[in-house]
C-alpha cells in the first residue's frame, strides 16, 4: 500500500469516526406526535391548559368572557352604563419579536416609566423576545430593573451555545441550555404567583404566542390563567412556553410540550411565535363591540405596539455569496411579515374603534444584529429606548406603510 493511499484511508476512517461521534452526541428532541387522523379528531378545547389557536375565534369565548365580567365590573364600575365619552380607558400592550433587539423595548418601557406616563396595561401580549419581556411588563414598573439588568448584561453564551457540526445531525445548530437556565433564574415561583395574584384581583390578561410546529399555526397561551394552576405544574410550563416562543427553528431546538386530551398522551412541538406572526394583539374574529355587549361594560380601548426592529428594510448593495443571500432573504421576509402583521392590527383597530399607537427602532439605528446578543450593541439599543421613552410622547398613530410620505 502506498503512503498516499494509506494517508487517504486514514483520513476517511477519521472522518467516519468523527461523524459517528457527532451523531452520537447530537441534540435531538423526543417527540410523540398525534397522527394526522388523531389530530383531525382531537378537540383541543378539552385541554386543561388555558390556550387557543391564534388564527380562529377561541372556542367558547363568550362563556369565558362572561366568567371574567364580575372582576372587570368591580375594577371598572364607571364602565357600567357608560358612553364612549365617559367610558374608562382600557389598554393593550403588544410586544414584537426581534431577538437581541428586544433591548430597545426594555429601554423604552423603562424610560416610559420614568416619564410617569406609562399606564397599567389591561392586556399584555408577547412574541419571541417579546415573550421574555411580557411577564415583567405585565407586572408593572417595579420589575423594570430586573429586565434592564438582564438585557444589559446578557451575552450570546447566556442564550445559546453554537454547535453547528452537532446540529447537522440533530434538531438544531445550537444548545439552548443557557436560556433555560436564565428563565429558571427569573421566571420563579414567586413571579408566577405574582402574575396569578394580579389576575385574580384585577382580571388583567397576559398572553404569549408560540407556533404549533406540527400544525403550522399560532397558539396563544393564557399565562395569567395558567399561573393560577398548581405551582409545580404552572412554573415549568410557563418557562417552556416562553422558551418555545423564543426558539428560532434550526438555530434553537423546538420545545416538546406534553399534553393529555381524552386520555391520550402526546407531545406537541412548539417554536418561535414569530414563525406564524411577529406580533399579536387579539383574534381578528372577535369584534370589540361584541366584547362590550357580553361584559355589559363600555370602554375606550387603546393598543400600544412596540416593534423591536426597524420598520423599513435598508438599502444594502447585495452580495452574491450564498450565505449572504440566504441571510438577506430571511431578513427581508421577516421584516415584511412583521410590517404586514402590524398593518393588519392597525386596520383591525380601525374596524373596532380602538386607538392605535406604535413605535419602532428609528431608522437612524440599523438594527441588524438580532441573533448575536452582543452586549455593547444591546446597551446602545437600550439607551436609545431609554432616551425615547423618557419623552413620553413618542407614539405614532399609524404604521409606516400607512403614513403619508413627506
Image (cartoon, rainbow, N blue to C red):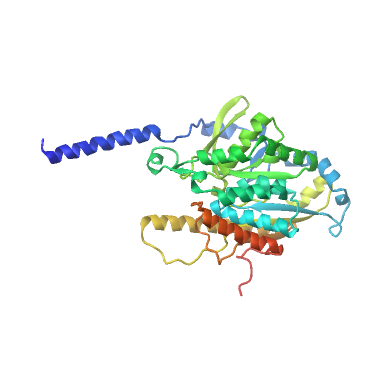
Furthest toward the top, the residue is 263
Q: Answer left or right for 363 relative to 120.
A: left
Q: Quadrant of residue 165?
A: top left
Q: Quadrant of residue 211?
A: top right
The residue sitting at 48% across, 52% down in the picture is 372
Q: Is residue 270 visible?
A: no
The residue closer to the viewer here, 58 or 319, is 319
- Quadrant where the N terminus sits is top left
Task: In the rendered view, tell whether residue 213 sits above or below residue 396.
Answer: above
- Quadrant where the C terminus sits is bottom right
The residue sitting at 63% across, 71% down in the picture is 404
- Residue 13, x across and y down, in percent: 24, 35
The residue sitting at 59% across, 37% down in the picture is 184
- Residue 21, x across and y down, in percent: 34, 33
The residue closer to the viewer here, 281 or 26, is 26
The residue closer to the viewer here, 382 or 222, is 382
Q: Answer left or right for 188 relative to 165.
A: right
The residue closer to the viewer here, 48 or 180, is 180
Q: Is residue 65 visible?
A: yes
- Residue 9, x across and y down, in percent: 19, 37
Amino acid at each position: 500500500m502506498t503512503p498516499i493511499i494509506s494517508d487517504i484511508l486514514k483520513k476517511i476512517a477519521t472522518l467516519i469516526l468523527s461523524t459517528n461521534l457527532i451523531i452520537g452526541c447530537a441534540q435531538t428532541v423526543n417527540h410523540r406526535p398525534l397522527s394526522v387522523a388523531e389530530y383531525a379528531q382531537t378537540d383541543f378545547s378539552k385541554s386543561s391548559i388555558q390556550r387557543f389557536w391564534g388564527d380562529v375565534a377561541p372556542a367558547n369565548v363568550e362563556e369565558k368572557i362572561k366568567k371574567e365580567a364580575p372582576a372587570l365590573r368591580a375594577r371598572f364600575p364607571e364602565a357600567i352604563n357608560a358612553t364612549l365619552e365617559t367610558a374608562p380607558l382600557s389598554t393593550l400592550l403588544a410586544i414584537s419579536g426581534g431577538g437581541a433587539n428586544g433591548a430597545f423595548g426594555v429601554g423604552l418601557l423603562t424610560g416610559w416609566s420614568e416619564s410617569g406616563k406609562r399606564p397599567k396595561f389591561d392586556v399584555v401580549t408577547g412574541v419571541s423576545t417579546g415573550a421574555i419581556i411580557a411577564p415583567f411588563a405585565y407586572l408593572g414598573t417595579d420589575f423594570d430593573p430586573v429586565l434592564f439588568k438582564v438585557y444589559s448584561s446578557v451575552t450570546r453564551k447566556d442564550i445559546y451555545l453554537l454547535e453547528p457540526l452537532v446540529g447537522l445531525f440533530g434538531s438544531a445548530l445550537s444548545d439552548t441550555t443557557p436560556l433555560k437556565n436564565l428563565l429558571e433564574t427569573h421566571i420563579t415561583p414567586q413571579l408566577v404567583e405574582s402574575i396569578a395574584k394580579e389576575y385574580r384581583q384585577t382580571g388583567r390578561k397576559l398572553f404569549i404566542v408560540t407556533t404549533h410546529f406540527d400544525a403550522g399555526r399560532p397558539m396563544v397561551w393564557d399565562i395569567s390563567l395558567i399561573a393560577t394552576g398548581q405551582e409545580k405544574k404552572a412554573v415549568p410550563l410557563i418557562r417552556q412556553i416562553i422558551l418555545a416562543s423564543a426558539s428560532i427553528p434550526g438555530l434553537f431546538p423546538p420545545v416538546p410540550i406534553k399534553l393529555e386530551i381524552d386520555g391520550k398522551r402526546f407531545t406537541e412541538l412548539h417554536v418561535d411565535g414569530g414563525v406564524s406572526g411577529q406580533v399579536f394583539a387579539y383574534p381578528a374574529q372577535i369584534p370589540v363591540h361584541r366584547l362590550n355587549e357580553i361584559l355589559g361594560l363600555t370602554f375606550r380601548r387603546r393598543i400600544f405596539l412596540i416593534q423591536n426592529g426597524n420598520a423599513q428594510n435598508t438599502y444594502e448593495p447585495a452580495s452574491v455569496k450564498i450565505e449572504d443571500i440566504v441571510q438577506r432573504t430571511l431578513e427581508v421576509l421577516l421584516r415584511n411579515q412583521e410590517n404586514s402583521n402590524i398593518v393588519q392590527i392597525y386596520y383591525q383597530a380601525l374596524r373596532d374603534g380602538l386607538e392605535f399607537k406604535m413605535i419602532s427602532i428609528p431608522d437612524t439605528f440599523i438594527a441588524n444584529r438580532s441573533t448575536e446578543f452582543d452586549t455593547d450593541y444591546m446597551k446602545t439599543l437600550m439607551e436609545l429606548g431609554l432616551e425615547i421613552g423618557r419623552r413620553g410622547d413618542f407614539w405614532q398613530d399609524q404604521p409606516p406603510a400607512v403614513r403619508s410620505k413627506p
